[in-house]
Image (tube, coloured by chain):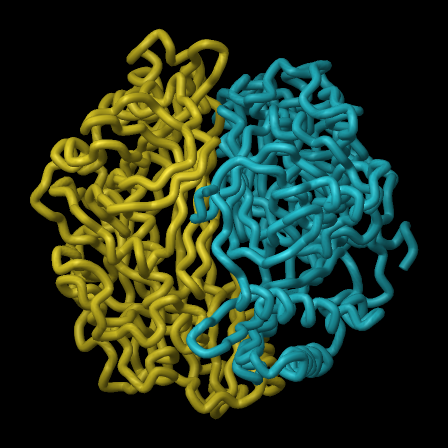
Chain colours: A cyan, B yellow
Amino acid sequence: MTTEIISRQPERFFLERFGLDRSLLEQIVGGAIARRADYADLYFEFRRAQSLGLEEGIVKSASQHVLQGVGVRVVAGDKTGYAYSDDVTVESLRLATRTAQAIAEESSDTRAVSVHQTPPVHDLYALQLAPLEAPLTEKVDLLSRIDIAARRHDPRIKNVMASIGVEQKLVLIVSSSGVLVGDVQPLVRLNITCIAEEGSNRQHGSYGGGGRVEYGFLLEEERYLRFTRAAADQALRNLQAVDAPAGTMTVVLGPGWPGILLHEAIGHGLEGDFNRKKVSAFSDLLGQPVASPLCTVIDDGTIAKRRGSLNVDDEGTPTGRTVLIDKGILRGYLQDRLNARLMGMPLTGNGRRESFAHIPMPRMTNTFMLAGESTPEEIVRSVDRGLYAAYFGGGQVDITNGKFVFSASEAYLIEGGRITRPVKGATLIGNGPEVLKHISMVGNDLHLDEGIGTCGKDGQSVPVGVGLPTVRIDALTVGGTQAAS
Amino acid sequence: MDAQPLQDVAERLLAAAKRHGASAADVVVAEGDTLEVGVRLGEVEKVKQARQKHLGLRVFIDKRSAITSSADFSHLALEQLAEDTCSLARVIAPDPFSGLPQAEELAAQIPDLDLYDPAIDALTAEQAIAAARETEQAALDSDPRITNSEGASYSSHTGRVVYASTLGFSGEYRTSSVSLSVVPVAAANGAMQRDYWYSAQRKLARLEEPAAVGRQAAARVLRRLNARRMPTCEVPVIFDAETAASLLSHLAGAVSGYALYKRTSFLLDKLGQRLAPEWVTVVDDGTIPGGLGSKPFDAEGLATRRTVVVDRGMLASYLLDTYSARKLNSRSTGNAARSVGDAPHVAPTNLVLQPGTASPADIISSVKRGLYVTELIGFGINPVTGDYSRGAVGQWIEDGAFAYPVEEITIAGNLLGMYDRIEAIGNDLQLRHAVAAPTVKIACMTVAGN
């Protein structure tokens, strides 16, 4: 597929599907920004999603969903009027526009708007074959192979739950600033959970991955087998886990998915909306040290085929690479259009929304720390007593006081510079503007996660990525049950 | 909105599914209007309005099943949907436990549970804005240390739900809901805190007064100012009514038939056993008039009911739908829930921890040294083992009284041990949410700090 077809296809698709034309879109957007409004946009979406689920050795569930609609937004100052409809007709567009416009004070004037196809800046996930088009029977077969592989891996694996989710999302964004841009966004995700049992001890382990890739990605280099073994091994290791320690101690985070630390501890706090409103613990800290000089943290929506990547954000702005922290100094915020304008800051391509039914907000894409100089072995060897956390469940942050948590699902004690016994999962808690100051070693092994992250904010979920090299944090609170003796 | 068309859509879709080879099928149709306004520092920040409709089709071809959903209700689209769903089902493995409920289990009548309030349909954006403004203003006016706000929001929803199946069941009900919330920000000594308060109801008249919601949010944020860290210790932990409800949500997850047959529940094989002291009784009741979790029939057409889940400390019942009941060789408890595009799963309706006799003040004064929890963050629950570890915010208790606020701590234990060591339950139950509890005291947990 060439770049040209990708960029043109969504427009043609939506106009044909809903019987619209470009001059009509210009008229509607022009009507929307009449007089008192600063900005208006239309967001058309057509999403098809398919999912297959296996448990107890058989593929039991299959589902397929079609979601379509249009969201109309009118912005005046810091006010947003929003209306959406799953019924895309000229009448519903006009009605939605009037509703959205009410916030900018009713007016019947129309402003002339002329929109132009915006040339694509990125082409990050052009595919030969959309994951939705890969034959269902192959997906069913893959799930069965995963079940067999997990059970063969170890007889203590007693149940396997696996699911494949694929989707294809077409969007078209038309704005009063003259932008007309479309995108075709594929997404694939494989999730595997294994249950291990030994006597009355039952444990689970989960692993998975994906991205904006073809379905075949799961098969390349036997990726699905690697995921399967990782889920099974996590469950098996948890059979041996001892109680996790409680209290403040040295924590080493493994590479990859533990990058959720960055997402929770600093990423959310650097989103433009919270900083414009000055309700973030990072408000007014631009140019200030917020991390050790070993830390450089980036948000990058332009990495090919990653789950968190986008050619354009959901306001039609090309995504970019934003340096959030440069050698310990806070350098940047993540912006959408509204907050960038009100703060007088550049757009960063981080205006995202869950669907046509949602108002865009500043959101992360792929957030990671650049590699440092230390080897992972050196880092572990440097710790006499501490915790090594290799894999995590979810996390959460209180933007205002900066306190964040993330929950380890695979962790070990470090004793005498060696990784020793597995410990039960525990929540780690820290303070966003402080935690990175305690990073005393950064590994040379930056990994991005496998492609499983979903971020929730104000009721909206979007796919994201994280990445981290091995890091040593000198002091972080570990929420286990064993108080130090 | 006219009642007939949605049921017609459902019937048409069922007929189409049968034409395309379905041996059985069911349909959920939902339609509704949403209004959402946000006000911040007295100014309108957003107004969002929409009408949405959606339907979900589940077909069975013998023991194979598939689910699809769409927002396109046109004849042509329904026909295509039925055909696609049947093709999808044909690639799936047969599952001997799958299928619709037995016809005799279906609700014989559909009670009016008083779930809809026309006053909410009549609500205008201007009224919503005025209420949100008043709420935020009350919070801002409460104290000069409240310097900022993430805003107040007011949202309302009214809608209709239809469920129909090839067993001949076709039922419909209307619902409404309205909620008001505010997040004030307070500052002291260079550090900020936020907290929130809310009210949610099915009836407009029962919504708390905006000023009362604002003042409560203010009181909650002010008591967090100057929070400290604290040393790691093992102490009694009191959950306020809001956070205590989360202990019931974890219970609901563990008594769900799906978690049990998949062996992912820490309550596996515990039915009939003692789970907690005799003063602990938990009831799921989908028939409470006007209840936020009430509904006249579940997502498979079975009547909702009152199920005692924990009876004076004994685990008395799991919560089941048709599929999970068959897997466990039992009968559905009428707890099937289904978002339009998903397969049924089990969910509680109104799940309530029955109140005790002690006042929250009595419970607090019973603690010499301990923690009173007012907010929990994070997802540190292991559903398979019950291991529990979450971030917490609260008040440190010395000699039966609040000494100072604490933060950046975790509380940890195991849910089995926590339920077992419930020492006191407050008399302060309010049905503020579908899952509700009064104040709960747990004898001992590990608090991790510095």
Could you tell whether A9 is left or right of B267 in the image? Answer: right
In the figure, A251 relative to B209: above or below? below
Residue at left offset 45%, top offset 91%: B96
Farthest-out residue, left: B357
Q: Position of residue B149 (x, y in %)?
A: 43, 19
- Res A118 quadrant in image: top right
Residue at left offset 75%, top offset 29%: A348
Q: Position of residue B119 (x, y in %)?
A: 23, 40
Q: Nearer the viewer, residue A201 or A446?
A: A201
- Res A36 quadrant in image: top right
Q: Nearer the viewer, residue B149 or A383?
A: A383
Could you tell whether A270 is left or right of B323 in the image? Answer: right
In the figure, A60 relative to A363: above or below? below
Q: Position of residue A116 (x, y in %)?
A: 82, 35
Farthest-out residue, top: B144
Could you tell whether B224 is left or right of A292 in the image? Answer: left
**The N terminus of chain B sits in image quarter:** bottom left
Q: Nearer the viewer, residue B119 or A296?
A: A296
Q: Nearer the viewer, residue B284 or A95?
A: B284
Q: Is residue B5 visible?
A: no
Residue at left offset 57%, top offset 84%: A57
